[in-house]
Every structure is written in C-alpha cells, then in structure tokens.
Amino acid sequence: METTLSSYLYSRKVFRAAVGTMFFMAGLCFASWASRIATIQQNLGLSDAALGGVLFALPVGLMCSLPFSGWIITKIGSRKLLISAITLYSLALVTLGLAQNTFQLIICLLVFGFTSNAVNISVNTQAVAVEKAYKKPILASFHGLWSLAGFTGAGIGTIMIANHVIPPYHFSIVLSIILIVTIITSKYLKDDKVADAGPVFVMPDNSLIKLGIIAFCSMICEGAMFDWSVIYFKKVVLAPVALVGLGYTAFMFTMATGRFIADSFAHRFGLKRTLQVSGLLTATGLTIAVLFPQLYTALLGFLLVGFGVSSVVPLVYSAAGKSKTMAPGVAIAAVSTISFMGFLIGPPVIGFIAGLATLKASFILIAAMGLSVFVLSTKAKI
C-alpha cells in the first residue's frame, strides 16, 4: 500500500514537471519572437502602422486554428496535439527570421499564430489534468513558468541583439532546444484521447464570459508589452541600443515573480481584491511610463505592469475551472479563447494607433485596459 502511494506521488510529480516544462518551451518560443520584433521591423523597413497591420496575421492564424484544434484534440488527444504543435510552432519561429519581405512575414505569422493556439489549448488541457490530480489550484504556477521562460527568452534576445546575432541564427538555436526537450519530455505527458469529447466549441455562460472579458483586457496589456515594449524603449525612451530590451526584461521578471505568488496572495486577500489591485498596478505603471518616458522611470513603470498583469489570467482560469455549469477543461478552454484574442489583437491595434498618433498615445489605451480590469472585477460577482 505504501509502495503504491509512493509510486502515485512520484508519477504525479513527474507529470507536473513534464507539463511545466512544455509551458516553459512554449513561453521561450513566443518570447524569442517578441524580443526580435524591432530587429525584424528595421530589417524589412516597416513603419509602426505597417507593423501593426502585419501583426494582425497572428490573431487571424489563431482564429483559423480554433475549429481545427477543437476537432483534432478529440481525435488524437492533447498529448499528441501538444507534441505536434510545439514542433511546428518552433519551426514557424525560424521562418519568421528568414522572411525577406512583408508578404512572407505575414504568411509566417499566420502559421505562427495557428500553431500557437494549438499549443495553448493542448498544454492547458494537460495542466487541467495535473490540477485534478493535485486537487488544488496550481494553474498559476504553470503560467509562472511560461512567464519565466518569457523572461529567459527576453534576456537571450537582449544578448543576441547586443552581439549582433541575426534572427535566423537566434531562432534556430531556440528550435534545437525545444525539439530536444520535447523528445525527452513527451513520454511523461498524459495520453487523454477519448472516443467522444462532445462538441468542438461550447459557448460559455454569462459568468464565464465576464471572467473572459477581464482576462481579455489584461491580455491586451500583456500582448502589447510583449510586442511593443522593446520598440517603446527604442523610440520613446531613447534607450541605448544595448538597453532597448531592458524594459521588456523587467516586465517579464515581475510578471514571472507575481505568478509564483498569485495563488497564496489570492487565498489571503480574495480573488476580487487581487484582480482589483492587479488592474490598478497595470494602469499606474503604464501611466508612469507615458508621463515620464526616461530610462529609470519607464523601467519602474514596466516593473509595475509586470506585477499587474501577472495574476489575472491564471486566477481567471482557476476560477473558470471551478464552474458549476461546465466541465473544468471546457470552461477553461472557452475563457482561454476569449482572453487569448486580447493577447493577439492588442499589439496590432497599438500599431495602428501609433501610426495615426504616437506610440505614447497608444500606451494610454493599454493603461485604460488596466483600469478596465479594476472596474470589471469590482462589478463582477466573484
């Protein structure tokens, strides 16, 4: 009996470690792209408005992926989908660095967005299974690993930029790492293929839609920080070339840190209060960065934004998993779909606003989204 229990606990820990590793690989892949957007923009001679238009290819790819991912996961399960999707995701990353013109970049971003959503759905489905095994909220820790990977990817990107390493070489190194880790980790993931998983997409109820909208607003901020923070430090803060990635790195550091303490903070102060504080931190940080666009003040602002957005998405996902009207996996997938659209729609909208006005003006919109998180969480019955 004791041996059986020990074996179960060990397998549960291995399963959690495997899923956490895949979250890290997914975050590293996206952060590698985000850290080199300014380089690719410069190489292709894109204006801010043109870049905003190009970035719309990401949410288009995501939307195209939704029916496919929902269908294929019922056929092969989340394990096989995750292995296939993370492989294609990292390959698509390399093509982004190889794009020679705007058309090629758009096509590559479509594929990148398509595969990113497949990874997002499958890895979160695996995480739900881990949470069920532990019988306690642990989604925030997985998202913390994704953020930690983002911080790592930002740091690597900063080093690559400082040493003039071109994106194709940078992205090829990341591809090699992801492929090796996936091969090692894949056998420890859960094979959850089922004969009939129900409909491809289920419309969430009102409570889940409200949670999704809160996460949507926060992820607009998060997505904008990923894609525009380096450019903001380059064009508005006028940071030295070697330091243009510093704001992005600082943002990723505090976001990763915040996600590792999110569960305990929410347990002590409650979900509503945690979301309110998160929204205020986001809005305050962005306001500081806009009003005082100098290196140290902008850096402080980005640090606050990282803390602000850190807990919103994992806590919303955890709350969705406790839905009384839908199965946990279905509820999280529905809320994830709503929120992830904000993550991908935000950056191109920022680009259009920057083209019509200024990049500083576009960051005011992000601050408004942070304030919306505060308002919506105050009114929501959570």
Image (cartoon, rainbow, N blue to C red):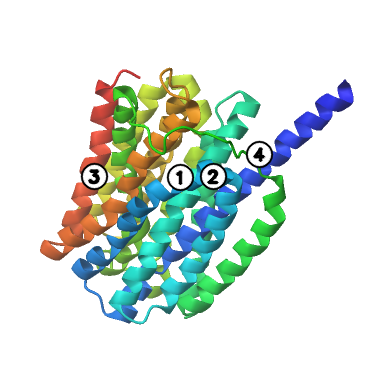
Labels 2 and 4: the sequence-earlier one: 4
What percent of the width, then of the height, locates residue 138?
56, 32
Q: Which amino acid does label 2 sit on?
A: Lys
Labels 2 and 3: the sequence-earlier one: 2
What percent of the width, then of the height, locates residue 49?
19, 67
Q: What residue type is labelled 3?
A: Ala
For disc 2, the neighbor class at 10 Å (few under 14, some 14 to 19, many from 20) is some
Labels 4 and 1: the sequence-earlier one: 4
Q: What element carries label 2?
A: helix
Q: Which amino acid does label 1 sit on?
A: Trp
Which mark is in front, 4 or 1?
1
Give the image quarter of residue 199.
top left
Q: Is mark 1 on a helix, strand or loop?
A: helix
Work out how far the residue at label 2 is from the one at label 4, CA to CA, in angstroms. 24 Å
Q: What residue type is labelled 4?
A: Arg
What percent of the width, then of the height, locates residue 29?
50, 60
Which quadrant would the N terminus be assigned to in this image? top right
Labels 1 and 3: the sequence-earlier one: 1
Labels 3 and 4: the sequence-earlier one: 4
Work out how far the residue at label 4 is from the one at label 1, CA to CA, in angstroms. 25 Å
Q: Can you tell which mark lies on residue 367?
A: 3
For disc 4, the neighbor class at 10 Å (few under 14, some 14 to 19, many from 20) is many
- Confirm whether residue 101 shows in the render: yes
Which mark is in front, 2 or 3?
2
Work out how far the residue at label 2 is from the one at label 3, CA to CA, in angstroms. 42 Å
Horizontal placement of 138 versus 366: left or right?
right
Tag 2 and tag 3, C-beta contact below 8 Å = no
Q: Residue at image x 71%, y 49%? A: 187
Residue topped by disc 4 = 16
Residue topped by disc 2 = 75
Q: What element carries label 4?
A: helix
